[in-house]
């Protein structure tokens, strides 16, 4: 069975600073990996997905994630945080079905 | 294009009442998922359908919960009788087809409060 762990339930950065949200997965077979974002009172929206075509995946809103098989990681980054990036972010791993991490709440300070 | 549509957006009702949540998936999507989100337990998959057929309902908490998908454009999640511990945000999601590489598209959820 597959699982995903998001390190840090809360991350706080200053506007303009690097955003790094950590995700590690466990799977016995090569998985598909996803990052979703949830804004207040809304559903989850797809940011990006990894499907083995390329290890560095670019998503919407300037986010990207790098698949590292040796580290079983799929961390999400953005070079410069914007106030509008404040939200909850979910990593998900999919083999037979999709499993979501517990989420990381990103706060952006002015 | 219209996304996943859920109704109602908010529901407040008293313990013991029947609650029905509704979902219209994206047109052409063959898989539909119901999730529950709480602070304590995070996002939990309750049930999912493929081509209107329930495939996995192992996440349904107990017999008070039931879900149906009478056609490709409509699904319901029913709680009867409701209890305060059912208070949560319930999401419906759909995907183009069944498959591990298929992203899910979420509605904006129904915030359910059982008094």
Image (cartoon, coloured by chain):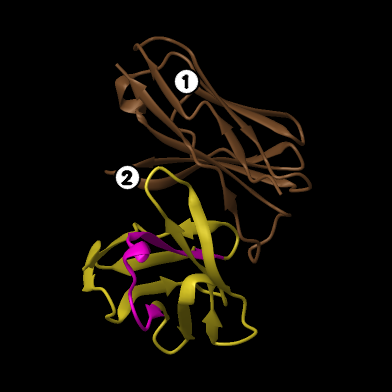
Q: In the rendered picture of this protein, how many numbered marks are placed on residues? A: 2
Picture layout, residue B95 above or below residue B65:
below
Query: Does the magenta portion include B3?
Result: no
Write down the chain letter for disc 1. Answer: B
- Start-end of magenta stretch: A77-94
The residue depicted at 58 percent of the width and 65 percent of the height is: A95
Query: Does the magenta portion include A87?
Result: yes
Task: Return the residue found at the far front.
Answer: A110
Q: In this rendering, which labeled residue sits more in front, label 2 or label 1?
A: 2
Mark 2, residue position: B41
- SS class, disc 1: loop
Across and down, in percent, residue B82 comes to: 40, 17
Q: Earlier in the sequence, mark 2 or mark 1?
A: 2
Across and down, in percent, residue A49 comes to: 56, 71
The residue depicted at 46 percent of the width and 80 percent of the height is: A65
Mark 1, residue position: B64
The residue depicted at 37 percent of the width and 73 percent of the height is: A23
Looking at the image, residue B60 sits to the left or right of residue B3; the answer is left
Q: Nearer the viewer, residue A21 or B59?
A: A21
Few, some or many residues within 10 Å of mark 2 (<14, 14–19, 20+) = few
Q: Give residue B107's quadrant in the image.
A: top right
Looking at the image, residue A109 sits to the left or right of residue A19; the answer is left
Q: What hue represents chain A?
A: yellow
Across and down, in percent, residue B60 comes to: 49, 34
Q: Nearer the viewer, residue B49 or A45?
A: A45
Few, some or many residues within 10 Å of mark 1 (<14, 14–19, 20+) = few
Q: Give residue B6's quadrant in the image.
A: top right
Question: Which chain is painted in brown?
Answer: B
Across and down, in percent, residue A47 comes to: 51, 67
């Amino acid at each position: 069975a597959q699982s995903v762990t998001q390190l840090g339930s809360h991350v706080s950065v200053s506007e303009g600073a690097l955003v790094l949200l950590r995700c590690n997965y466990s799977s016995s077979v090569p998985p598909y990996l996803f990052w979703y974002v949830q804004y207040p009172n809304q559903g989850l929206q797809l940011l990006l997905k990894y499907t083995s075509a390329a290890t560095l995946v670019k998503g919407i809103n300037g986010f990207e994630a790098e698949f590292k098989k040796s580290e079983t990681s799929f961390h999400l980054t953005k070079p410069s945080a914007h106030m509008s990036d404040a939200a909850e972010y979910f990593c998900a791993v999919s083999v037979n079905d999709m499993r979501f991490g517990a989420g990381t709440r990103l706060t952006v300070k002015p | 294009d219209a996304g996943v549509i859920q109704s109602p957006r908010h529901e407040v009702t008293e313990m013991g009442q029947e609650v029905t949540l509704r979902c219209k998936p994206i047109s052409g999507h063959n898989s539909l998922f119901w999730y529950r989100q709480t602070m304590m337990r995070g996002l939990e998959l309750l049930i999912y359908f493929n081509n209107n057929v329930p495939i996995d309902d192992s996440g349904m908490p107990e017999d008070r919960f039931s879900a149906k998908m009478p056609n490709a454009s409509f699904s319901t999640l029913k709680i009867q009788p409701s209890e305060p511990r059912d208070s949560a945000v319930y999401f419906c999601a759909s995907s183009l087809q069944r498959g591990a590489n298929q992203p899910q598209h979420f509605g904006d959820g129904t915030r359910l409060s059982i008094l």
